[in-house]
Amino acid sequence: MDGNLITYLACICFIFIFGRIFIVPLKKILKLVFNSILGGITIFLINLIGSNFGFHIGLNIFTSIIVRFIRIARSSVLNNC
């Protein structure tokens, strides 16, 4: 009985340790995915409006990441002024 209790407690400790190790990269990955989705929506809206003027941006994962990153960088620079 005591061996099972110690095993359960050790497993719970390992789960918490692994959770702490992997939560930081997981947060960064989820932030990148969220920013990519927002960048894709931004590009889609630009393409919708720009189609009237013959303006088009290719919609793929790289452009959506870049658009969102530039937007975040631009807003942080403007907030510091």
Image (cartoon, grey):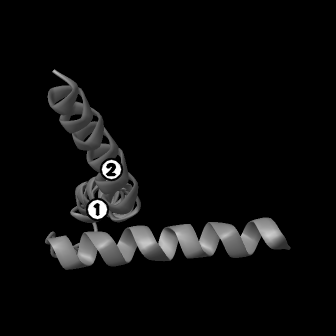
Residues 29 and 34: in front is 29
Residue 31 falls in image quadrant: bottom left
Q: Relative to residue 28, is residue 11 depicted above or below?
A: above
Viewed as shown, does residue 51 lie left or right of 31?
left
- SS at circle 2: helix
Q: 20 and 29: which one is in front?
A: 20
Task: Check the picture and name the quadrant holding the N terminus.
Answer: top left
Q: Is residue 38 visible?
A: yes
Q: Tell me if 6 is positioned left or right of 28 in this view.
A: left
Q: Nearer the viewer, residue 76 or 19?
A: 19
Q: What is the total number of numbered labels drawn onto the structure image?
A: 2
User: Which one is earlier in the sequence, the residue at label 2 or at label 1?
Assistant: 2
Question: Does the rendering let one see residue 55?
Answer: no
Residue at 13 percent of width and 72 percent of height: 60
User: Vertically, is 51 above or below 37?
Assistant: below
Residue 34 placement (x, y as % from top left): 33, 53
Q: Real-space Cα distance between discs 2 and 1?
A: 25 Å
Residue shown at 22% from the left, 26% from the top: 2
Q: Percent from the top left, x then y, of residue 54? A: 21, 73
Q: Which residue is mark 1?
A: 36
User: Residue at (44%, 73%) from the top-left corner?
Assistant: 69
Q: Amino acid at mark 1?
A: Ser
Q: Residue 18 falls in which quadrant of the image?
A: bottom left
Nearer to us of marks 2 and 1 is: 2
Crowd rating for badge 2 (residues with CA inside 10 Å; few <14, some 14–19, many 20+): few
Which residue is identified by label 2? 19
The three-letter amino acid code for the residue at tag 2 is: Gly
Q: Which secondary structure, mark 1?
A: helix
- For the C terminus, the quadrant is bottom right
Residue 3 sits in quarter: top left
